[in-house]
Amino acid sequence: MTEPLLSVRNLAVEFPTRHGILTAVQDISFDIMPGEVLGMVGESGAGKSMTGAAIIGLIEPPGRIARGEIWLRDQRIDNLPPEKMRKIRGRHIGMIFQDPLTSLNPLYRISDQLIETIRTHLPVSRDEARKRAVKLLDDVGIPDASRRIDDYPHQFSGGMRQRVVIALALCAGPELVIADEPTTALDVSVQAQIIEVMKELCAEHGAAIMLVTHDMGVIAEAADRVAVMYAGRLAEIGPVRDVIKDARHPYSQGLMGAIPRLGESLERLVHIPGSMPRLNAVPPGCPFNPRCPKVFDKCRTHRPATSEIEPGRRAACWLYPGVTEA
Amino acid sequence: MLAFIIRRLAQSVLVMLFVALIAFIVFRYVGDPITAMVGVETRLEDQEIMRERLGLNDPVIVQFLRFIGNAMRGEFGISYRLQQPVTELILSRLPATLELAFASATIALVFGLVLGVYTALRPRSFGSAIIMAASLVGVSLPTFLIGIALIYIFAVELGWFPSFGRGQVVDLGSWRTGLLTESGIRSIILPAITLSLFQLTLIMRLVRAEMLEVLRTEYIRFAKARGLTQRAINFGHALKNTLVPVITITGLQLGSVIAFAIVTETVFQWPGVGSLFIVSVQVVDVPVMAAYLMFIALVFVLINLIVDILYYVVDPRLRVDGGGAGK
């Protein structure tokens, strides 16, 4: 078995506030293999974006990594000094943000932003960097790249800008790309294209993807494995096919059940009753227990850890033998 | 770009015409210029002759057109008080005012930018807290008080700088400069600081607010996520975006520095256009007042024009026809 590219171990992210400490991410562990696409799903506030921010070291203060470790191959990166972490960002871990309209600096040409990023990380001349940039723009599907590279961001459409963002995230050759809702702000018609471009390009460069989204369709299409987050915790993680067909955690079962399918006539869209607890009001026991259709006594008092329930699959639910207490 | 400049020029001409109208109305209707010029003993017939000779009996519209025609040739008549051509008078005073304005604008811009960026990058530091508190004093104290306080401390008590005047001046053709002699430099320091203080705090607070705003944007986060150096992010990406609104304010402030040098020039007895204006107001020297009004309007219009052109240079989004392929 190959070494994982990224290992997250018992990660917890906290925000100190006037009303006490909010735990945005609690005790999360997972691996990402080289070249793998890991999907991260969950409702808004489930902690999926925060996990991504923690990995790349961009949690906004006063938020901080309270516990746990993050390893990139054999280097621990969660406690690196800022200058060392900066050299990892872009070079080893890239990030794609949600809104392509605001991700690009409006006053700089695309070429300047690409060349600057490439030359920050790689010892190449301006000309070489430019060649590399043109090639990348070509790869992400920008027509007439050698000319359009000198345009400003406002001269591109939203979908094209997200392609530029992808090129920027990949330009220094990272091994892992964290894509934080990369298609949420885009037109439905271009979402699939963008996912396609991103997946293809990462595969070509051998980069793994951590795909953060709330769109199960995107996950089903693009991911190899999926991690389902709920209230800052990992509810379930496993191969995407298995989880979609046969989800184990009642929350993921609800999520999968809520995907509308073509050809099925429904009176109403299926939904999970209730809403995710606020971070300062997570109930004792399993955080999902107030909404869970299969809740029993133990769920209300004891918190299940995300434990292996069969090879390659982990879930945090007392329904399964072998689940330990957190 | 060219069409834009031409359009803006046309607007500028309109503004100038409007100001000319106001200046003319002031010129014509604020008090009777004849009574202001002559003594009590002048006979009424002589006054009537003067009135005729100055063209004050012509129809209003003729007088206005004449006023504009003269103004375009840079003629604003003869100062009632000094019996000298007004244009000559203003031009001889202009170097003093421009040098003062230039010096204080430089101080305001340099320190405003540096302090603004510093307080934005280290919002929680002790230094920032002190600078912010001091800047409150800067915006709230009136200029004359600051000037008097500076004179008291640095001229009277410490004796470092002269308390009034321009010091030794040197003639460079028609430009009389105080910036080439030691006493001239020493003389300009206190008034320049006085005049700059308000603009400095304004620019600083603006830069700080804008920079804090910019630092929160997605493209700065994305720049960080790409591992760009802190230096490249702060002084390249963030600062350039901060400058767009700062340019406007700074440009307009430069106008006010020239226009409102009046108070500072009075406090420091600086022989500039502002003090000329104050004296002229006291004796109702209408031609000088009208010319001053036109001059200040011209300064503002020109600065606005330059600011608009600078926008084009800084912000590519405004260059509709430039920069490659378009959509």
Image (spheres, grey):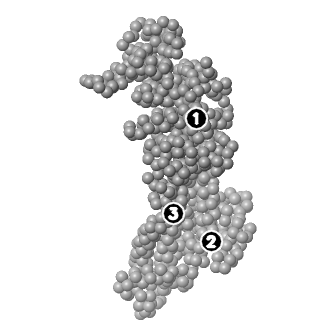
Q: Residue at x 68, y 57 (%)?
A: B153
What kind of residue is marked 2? Ala
| Up-down relation of residue B91 to residue B197 (above or below) | below
Q: Which residue is mark 3?
A: B309
> Pointers 1 and 2 in contact (CB under 8 A)?
no
Q: Which residue is mark 2?
A: B96
Image depth: mark 3 or mark 2 in front: 3
Chain letter of mark 2 equals B
Quadrant in the picture for residue B233: top right
Q: Secondary structure at mark 1?
A: helix
- Marks 3 and 2 sit apart, C-alpha to C-alpha, by 28 Å
Q: Residue at x 48, y 27 (%)?
A: A223
Do pointers 1 and 2 mark residues of a single chain? no
- Which residue occupies the foreground of this view, B272 or B234? B234
> Pointers 3 and 2 in contact (CB under 8 A)?
no
Local crowd size for mark 1, using a 10 Å CA cut-off: few (<14), some (14–19), many (≥20): some
Local crowd size for mark 3, using a 10 Å CA cut-off: few (<14), some (14–19), many (≥20): some
